[in-house]
Amino acid sequence: MASSTRSSAFQSLLRGRSSLARTPQRRWAQVHDVRFLATHHDPNHILDRYKSKLDRKAKEEGHGSVESLKEAYKDKIQGFRRNAATPLTPEPTTPPSSPKSFSAANPPPPPTPPPSPKAAAAAAKSSPSPRRR
């Protein structure tokens, strides 16, 4: 009997140590969200390409810079902006003078005060209660 007790104690020690001797497996694999990478490009790349096209167009037409190209096409640009503006939201011709003038002309209505407890009790007494049959 003593030998069986010793062997079971010895086996439990071995089982206990074997779990300590083993280290858990580490997983280093990473999952990359390629959907994000496929749809979100560098925005500076697009702006740089647009600027280079504007520079090329300015040089082809004999302008020194993009600003002089904008001045040459000023009327055409304004015409496109006028045509693109919808009747419901027209493009402002001049900026508003100040936000204070708008708020002074149309002040917001004053808040309604909450009913007092006495008025609520009086209203409850005066209203007829439904009769039960």
Image: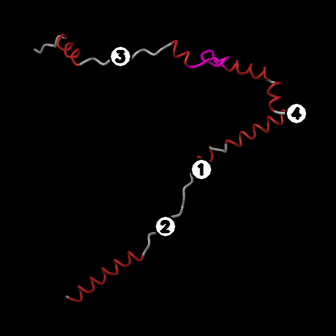
Query: For the residues carrying marks 2 and 1, which lies nearer the camera in this image?
Result: 2
Q: Where does label 1 land, which residue?
A: 34
Residue type pointed to by label 1? Val
The tag earlier along the polypeptide, 4 or 3, is 4
Q: With 132 as the anchor, is 97 left or right in this view?
A: right
Q: Are marks 4 and 2 in contact (CB under 8 Å)?
A: no
Of 95 and 86, nearer the camera is 95
19 sits left or right of 131 in the view: right
Q: Which residue is mark 2?
A: 26
What amino acid is found at the position of numbered circle 2 in the picture?
Answer: Arg
Q: Residue furthest left?
A: 133
The residue indicated by pointer 3 is: 112
Q: Are marks 2 and 1 in contact (CB under 8 Å)?
A: no
* Circle 1 Cα neighbour tier, 10 Å, few/some/many (<14 / 14–19 / ≥20): few
Marks 4/2: CA–CA distance: 61 Å
Q: Nearer the viewer, mark 4 or mark 3?
A: 3
- For the residue labelled by badge 3, is the local secondary structure a helix, a strand or a loop? loop
Which of 99/93 is in front?
Answer: 99
Q: Residues within 10 Å of mark 2 (few under 14, many from 20)?
A: few
Image quadrant in which you'd find residue 15 = bottom left
- The magenta region covers 85-99
Does dot 4 land on a helix, a strand or a loop? Answer: helix
State whether residue 91 appears in this view.
no
Q: Which residue is mark 4?
A: 60
User: Label 3 neighbourhood size at 10 Å, few (<14), some (14-19), many (20+)?
Assistant: few
Q: Earlier in the sequence, mark 1 or mark 3?
A: 1
